[in-house]
């Protein structure tokens, strides 16, 4: 019985072939183990009874004990419904059914004592419960019911009779078969040290908790285990990479770096930039391959740090490459780097898909013979004809835009893997970073360059934008430029949002004295680039755009970002869009426009945006509001894990603790071959989802 992984769920009492097929297609439950690890998503305390006179519509679920006084049919057509008047002596509640009236009237009798369970609402001042669960009072022992688990199901399952109650019964049938302890997945020394429940106790208690304390202990054990193995896997990967991959040794800071630092820096480095440069220099001089994530808010100076890191590579006789996700961003990097390095005698080239013919051939030859010092590129650098003479450092900007397999191809450009610096302008909360990027060292630039003024962010309602447009008039008259962002290109019949085509026509009419650019993702690259360049040169004063401008537009004269239908954007995206302004010396403004009626979640997002410009604070709030799966740029195919119970938003302290424990184990036994650690290796082997070891790729 104990080999749950290999036993087909269809042989469990109450399942059979039809239900087994449904469980497999809807919940990916195929074995008894799959069912056992399908955890409830909530629990309702069935031991407590409420009085009708203390119930309000905000309560999630309630339980009442009393009698049905009478039945009544109300309404006509689709609104026809059966109403039972239920009393417990303190008041009357209305129980409502929209179908199955005959069954209800035949089954339940006035004057009999019943226990009613359901979600209350208030209708015309009365407590109302739709389709409640009803049981005769003498059939229930409420004291023993305790916390009742509820399981996620789909509409297809419910139509086939597999609702939460049916799943609960199947799990009960499974638990009744477990008469001996299940094989442990953590060694006893760790269970004892961490004061954890046994696996068997935890799995039983999470499905059938006697009380809240037992449930907490069960959750603690199971959360510990899944987070521990994620962190142990990452710690093992990192340890293995450090052992296997030796890096180029950049032993000196030379002429190019020192000349640029002395005469070429356009502004003084912040203390945070200096700290990160020291970390990078230490890595690249250590003899091990650097694999570092550089986090920094919009405008914090990540590119300058990357450029100075590339100069370290050049001073030590190596080439460097910076890879960006779009042609626009790569062209911007190329222009900035070329400008910064003017006069240093270095050859900087740009390679994108649109560069053809003799120019492309010249660049390829320069890379192969070493005369090209720095290459700025898109994914075009991954193509086989692109070969380097001596590639020592790869910088990957907005790294979430590149898949792991794509990045792995860069390694084939050099016999010894180059040092890797990956950058992101989407700040990642600490607990998320240490889980998603646990095999990378993390550097953070948490200061903005001096002279940057915080962007003033305000919230406005679309029903009254008179003041907003008057303010735009003033800023434009003072010589500034403005972005106006819409979430859609064309009108959608399904979604009532301001669309870019209509918005463009309105802005042209409202501001006839100014030229207006229009940019969106359906434009050809050359058209898009032409419009962006016109705006950058100041030939157009207003840019009407979709989120295509989120990355890669740097116009210091633009001081206004107006975001229409801001309620349709996540916090991370709003923050990225806001970062397009505030790049010059003038005060900049971000105006978030929503309808007057918005949800509570939207209101919280808008309040966060207007309260702070700190990207890390915003990222923490985004994690708590939406969970890690929704955060822009955090889905990485190279780190595959499925958290059934733990939460990256809520369990930060536990993540830090298990990370420390995992690293402690790997530091003393990197191969997990000691007798007390053999179980870890066995479980990791079973959990491994892919035969490809992507762990050594950034």
Image (cartoon, helix red, strand yellow):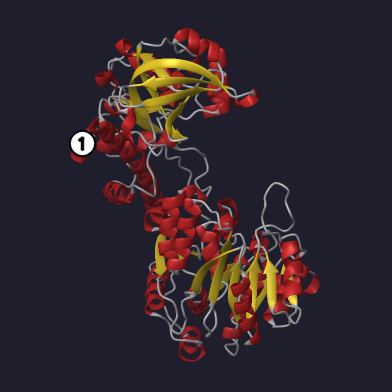
Q: Looking at the picture, how far across and down is residue 36, in whole percent?
A: 40, 24
Image quadrant holding the N terminus, namely top left
Q: Looking at the picture, how far across and down is residue 139, in whole percent?
A: 32, 11
Q: Residue at x 76, y 63 (%)?
A: 523
Q: Front-most of 584 and 83?
A: 83
The quarter holding residue 323 reads bottom right
Q: Looking at the picture, how far across and down is residue 440, in whole percent?
A: 42, 58
Q: Front-most of 418 and 259?
A: 259
Q: Residue furthest top?
A: 106
The quarter holding residue 364 reads bottom right
User: Can the viewer see residue 397 in this picture?
Assistant: no
Q: Residue at x 49, y 46 (%)?
A: 693
Q: Is residue 17 above or below residue 306?
A: above
User: Local crowd at mark 1 within 10 Å, few (<14), some, or many (≥20)?
Assistant: few
User: Can the viewer see residue 11 in this picture?
Assistant: yes
Q: Could you tell me how many numbered marks the image carries?
A: 1
Q: Is residue 46 above or below residue 619?
A: above
Q: Residue at x 48, y 77 (%)?
A: 312
Q: Looking at the picture, how far across and down is residue 486, in whole percent?
A: 66, 62
Q: Front-most of 430 and 43?
A: 43
Q: Front-most of 23 and 302?
A: 23
Left/right of residue 159 with respect to residue 454 in the rendered view: right
Q: Dot 1: what SS?
A: helix
Residue picked out by circle 1: 189
Q: Residue furthest right?
A: 357
Left/right of residue 144 with respect to residue 27 in the rendered view: left
Left/right of residue 69 with respect to residue 266 in the rendered view: left
Q: Is residue 59 above or below residue 570?
A: above
């Amino acid at each position: 019985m104990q080999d749950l992984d290999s036993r087909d769920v269809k042989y469990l009492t109450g399942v059979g072939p039809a239900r087994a097929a449904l469980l497999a297609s809807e919940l990916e439950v195929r074995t008894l183990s799959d069912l056992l690890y399908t955890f409830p998503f909530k629990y309702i305390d069935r031991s407590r009874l409420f009085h009708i006179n203390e119930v309000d519509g905000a309560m999630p679920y309630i339980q009442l004990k009393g009698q049905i006084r009478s039945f009544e049919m109300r309404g006509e057509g689709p609104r026809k419904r059966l109403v039972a008047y239920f009393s417990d002596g303190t008041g009357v509640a209305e129980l409502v059914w929209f179908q199955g009236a005959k069954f209800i009237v035949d089954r339940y009798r006035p004057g009999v004592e019943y226990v009613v369970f359901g979600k209350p609402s208030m209708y015309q001042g009365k407590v109302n419960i739709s389709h409640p669960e009803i049981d005769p009072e003498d059939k229930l022992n409420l004291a023993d019911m305790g916390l009742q688990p509820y399981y996620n199901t789909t509409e297809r399952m419910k139509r086939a009779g597999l609702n939460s109650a049916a799943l609960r019964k199947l799990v009960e049938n499974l638990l009744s078969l477990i008469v001996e302890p299940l094989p442990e997945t953590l060694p006893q020394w760790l269970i004892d040290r961490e004061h954890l429940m046994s696996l068997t106790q935890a799995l039983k208690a999470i499905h059938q908790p006697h009380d809240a304390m037992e449930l907490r202990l069960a959750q603690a054990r199971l959360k510990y285990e899944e987070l521990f193995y994620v962190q142990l896997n990452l710690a093992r990967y990192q340890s293995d990479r450090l052992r296997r991959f030796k890096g180029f040794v950049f032993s000196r800071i030379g002429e190019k770096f020192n000349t640029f630092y002395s005469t070429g820096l356009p502004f003084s480095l912040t203390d945070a930039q200096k700290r990160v440069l020291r970390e990078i220099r230490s890595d690249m001089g250590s003899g091990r391959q650097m694999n570092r994530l550089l986090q920094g808010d919009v405008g914090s100076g990540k590119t300058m740090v990357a450029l100075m890191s590339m100069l370290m590579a050049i001073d030590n006789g190596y080439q460097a490459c910076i890879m960006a996700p779009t042609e626009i961003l790569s062209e911007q990097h190329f222009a900035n780097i070329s400008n910064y390095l003017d006069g240093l005698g270095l050859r900087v080239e740009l390679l994108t898909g649109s560069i053809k013919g003799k120019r492309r051939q010249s660049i390829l030859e320069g890379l192969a013979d070493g005369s090209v010092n720095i290459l700025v590129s898109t994914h075009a650098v991954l193509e086989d004809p692109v070969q380097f003479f001596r590639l020592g450092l790869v910088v990957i900007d907005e790294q979430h835009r590149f898949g792991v397999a794509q990045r792995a191809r860069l390694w084939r450009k050099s016999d010894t893997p180059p040092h890797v610096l990956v950058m992101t302008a989407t700040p990642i909360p600490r607990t998320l970073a240490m889980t998603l990027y646990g095999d990378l060292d993390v550097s953070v630039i948490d200061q903005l360059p001096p002279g940057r003024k915080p962007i003033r962010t305000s919230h406005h309602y679309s029903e009254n934008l008179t003041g907003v447009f008057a303010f735009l008039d003033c800023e434009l008259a003072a010589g500034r430029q403005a972005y106006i962002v819409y979430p859609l290109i064309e009108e959608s019949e399904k979604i009532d949002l301001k669309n870019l085509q209509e918005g463009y026509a309105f802005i042209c009419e409202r501001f006839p004295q100014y030229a207006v650019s229009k940019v969106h993702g359906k434009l050809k690259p050359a058209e898009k680039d032409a419009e962006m360049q016109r705006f950058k040169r100041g030939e157009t004063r207003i840019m009407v755009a979709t989120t295509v401008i989120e990355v890669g537009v740097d116009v210091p004269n633009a001081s206004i970002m107006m975001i229409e239908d801001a309620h349709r954007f996540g916090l991370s995206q709003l923050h990225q869009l806001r970062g397009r302004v505030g790049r010059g010396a003038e005060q900049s403004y971000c105006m978030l426009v929503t309808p007057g009626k918005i949800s509570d979640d939207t209101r919280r997002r808008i309040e966060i945006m207007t309260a702070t410009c700190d990207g890390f604070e915003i990222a923490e709030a985004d994690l708590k509001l939406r969970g890690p799966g929704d955060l822009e740029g955090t889905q990485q195919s190279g780190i595959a894990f499925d958290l059934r119970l733990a939460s990256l938003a809520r369990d930060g302290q536990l993540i830090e603790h298990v990370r420390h424990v995992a690293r402690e184990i790997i530091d003393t036994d990197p191969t997990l071959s000691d007798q007390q650690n053999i179980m870890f290796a066995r479980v990791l082997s079973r959990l491994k989802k892919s035969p490809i070891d992507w762990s050594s790729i950034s």
